[in-house]
Image: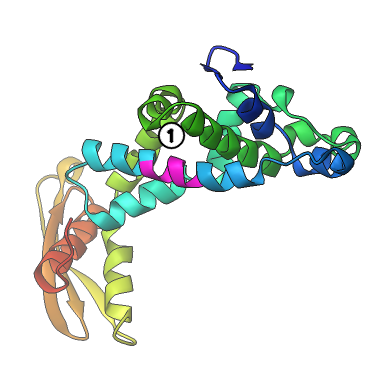
Amino acid sequence: MELKGIYKFKDKNLYDLARTHTSYANEKRSGRTDSNQRLEFLGDSVLSIIVSEFIYKNYSHMPEGSLTKIRAEVVCERSLYEIAKSINLGSYLLLGKGEEKGGGRKRVSILADAMEAFLGAIYLDSDLDTVKKVFMPLITDQIVAAAGKEGKKDYKTTLQEHVQQNGSAEIIYKTVNESGPDHDKTYEVTVSVNGQEQGSGVGKTKKDAEQMAAKDALLNYYDEAL
């Protein structure tokens, strides 16, 4: 009744239910065996709330859109699979003979779903704070990595997305000034949308200056919280 080194269940039935794949339940149908699908449903919501709370508290400088992107990258099948693999979750599962022979213990979808089921089971066996203590250490590195990528925001792409919401538009970046020696130049760039200048930026490369010009335009014209 224990995920070794992770959590010890008080309720044996919850532990067994969390590890029961549908293939096993179907084979044992005469014995009225249930699968972990309902626990998986619950675990999905538990995962979403604990990750949402963590990024809300730890990335207070980021807008709602960025938090949503971070959560989406972390609360996904691939992420859950990696965590399940790291704790050898496959070895705990009850699988039908076909899934067993087909390598089900290493299958991405099965492990990801089982991870959600165990989250749901731990929640029912304890409480939300316990789930956080058990699970957050397993996923924090993935959150930090996702937040790091989001922190390096592509302002040019964001600007393009904004202006295209109102139909087609011509976005032009223009270098208006270069200063400094060849080995240490600084560039100033402006950005215009349909002929109207909307922002300017400075950078050590033209690409960086264009990103800053796009950011300036987003702040000035599109109410983008950056």
Q: Main secondary structure of the magenta part?
A: helix
- Residue beneath label 1, please? 142
Q: Quadrant of the N terminus?
A: top right
Q: Residue furthest front?
A: 31
Q: Position of residue 11 (x, y in %)?
A: 58, 23
Q: Against 175, is 17 above or below?
A: above
Q: Which residues are magenta?
A: 44-49
Residue 187 as seen in the image, left or right of residue 152: left
Q: Residue at x 17, y 45 (%)?
A: 61
Between 169 and 93, the residue placed more toward the observer is: 93
Instruction: Verify whether residue 83 appears in magenta.
Output: no
Mark 1 neighbour density, 10 Å: few (under 14) some (14–19) many (20 or more) = some
- Whether residue 176 is visible here, answered yes or no, is no
Q: Position of residue 190 (x, y in %)?
A: 14, 69
Residue 92 as seen in the image, left or right of residue 9: right
Report which quarter residue 194 is drawn in: bottom left
Q: Position of residue 46 (x, y in %)?
A: 44, 41
Q: Residue at x 33, y 39 (%)?
A: 148
Label 1: element kind: helix
Identify the amino acid type marked 1. Gln
Between 166 and 20, the residue placed more toward the observer is: 20
Residue 162 as seen in the image, left or right of residue 4: left
Report which quarter residue 13 is drawn in: top right
Q: Residue at x 65, y 46 (%)?
A: 37
Q: Residue furthest top?
A: 5
